């Protein structure tokens, strides 16, 4: 006799996908030209380097913002996310960057939509390193921690660590992304019991993710 109970929705399989997509641009170095949607307004870049001017410090601040781009784009509709990436990319890297909306961001959003609970996705910059700086170009590596989970279900929050390497070029009055790569970062062993997503959300009530201004 068939059960009358509704099928269980999948739990946080998104955690693994979120970790892989910590920086949604990393796997697209050989990307093809992505299609452009007409009628998009182009917002200002995610970084504040335009006000500061080109310098090693402004490159670090721009890289910190770009390294956590997934947490900023995650709730956006695809057209808006594509417009943001188009503004943040260099002229030569724009096609590769905008393609990642269809190949990485949209599939992850669709996966999350099938899960129970409310998704929690946070990215935090832990440290930065200037690999090279010769204006108008810079290379900065950012150590990032990703926390993912679903509130409202009996599940734990999980985290992963990544090293995100960003090639930057000063174009159109700000630092723009000109290339990316990523690798698993130094991952410390966490002490204490895992924290449930609801406990994590409650303890962080009123906090905003920190980014350089």
Image (spheres, helix red, strand yellow):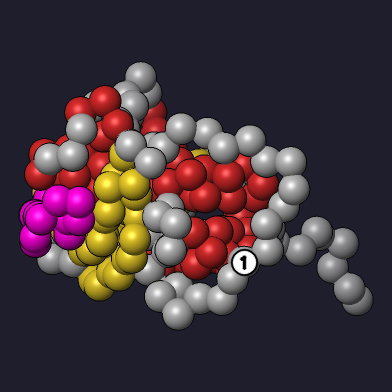
Q: Does residue 75 appear left or right of residue 187 in this picture?
A: right
Camera-side residue: 199 or 63?
A: 63
Q: Is residue 29 above or below residue 87?
A: below
Q: Residue furthest bottom?
A: 30
Give the magenta range: 128-140
Q: Is residue 86 above or below residue 204?
A: below
Residue 147 in the magenta stretch? The answer is no
Task: Check disc 1 and report the residue beneath it.
Answer: 34
Can you tell which quarter of the image residue 6 is in?
A: bottom right
Q: Residue at x 52, y 50 (%)?
A: 86
Q: Taking 106 as reference, is 60 above or below it?
A: above
Q: Is residue 200 visible?
A: no
Question: Which quadrant, please, contains the C terminus?
Answer: top left
Query: Predominant secondary structure in magenta?
Result: strand
Horizontal side of residue 157 vs 43, given as left or right: left
Residue found 63% across the figure and 59% down from its top: 106
Residue 35 image position (x, y, % from top left) = 68, 63
- The single residue placed furthest to the top in the displayed view is 206
Residue at 27 percent of width and 53 percent of height: 169
Q: Nearer the viewer, residue 50 or 124?
A: 50
Across and down, in percent, residue 5 comes to: 81, 59
Query: Seen in the image, is 73 located left or right of residue 22?
Result: right
> Residue 212's x, y, as percent?
22, 32
Number of other residues with Cα within 10 Å of mark 1, as a class: few under 14, some 14 to 19, many 20 or more: some
Residue toward you, 184 or 166: 166
Horizontal side of 88 relative to 53 (left or right) equals right
């Amino acid at each position: 006799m068939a059960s009358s109970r509704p099928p269980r929705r999948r739990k946080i399989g998104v955690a693994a996908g979120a970790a892989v997509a910590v920086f949604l641009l990393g796997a697209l170095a050989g990307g093809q030209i992505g299609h452009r949607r007409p009628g998009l307004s182009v917002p200002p870049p995610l970084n504040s380097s335009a006000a500061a001017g080109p310098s090693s410090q402004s490159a670090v601040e721009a890289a910190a913002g770009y390294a956590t781009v997934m947490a900023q784009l995650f709730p956006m509709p695809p057209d808006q996310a594509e417009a943001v990436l188009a503004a943040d990319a260099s002229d030569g890297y724009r096609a590769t960057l905008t393609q990642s909306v269809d190949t990485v961001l949209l599939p992850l959003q669709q996966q999350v939509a099938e899960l129970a609970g409310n998704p929690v996705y946070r990215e935090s910059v832990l440290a930065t390193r200037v690999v090279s700086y010769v204006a108008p170009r810079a290379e900065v590596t950012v150590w990032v921690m990703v926390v993912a989970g679903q509130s409202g279900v009996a599940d734990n929050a999980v985290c992963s660590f990544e090293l995100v390497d960003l090639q930057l070029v000063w174009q159109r009055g700000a630092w723009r992304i000109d290339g990316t790569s990523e690798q698993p970062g130094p991952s410390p062993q966490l002490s204490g019991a895992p924290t449930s997503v609801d406990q994590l959300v409650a303890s962080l009530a009123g906090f905003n993710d920190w980014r350089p201004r």
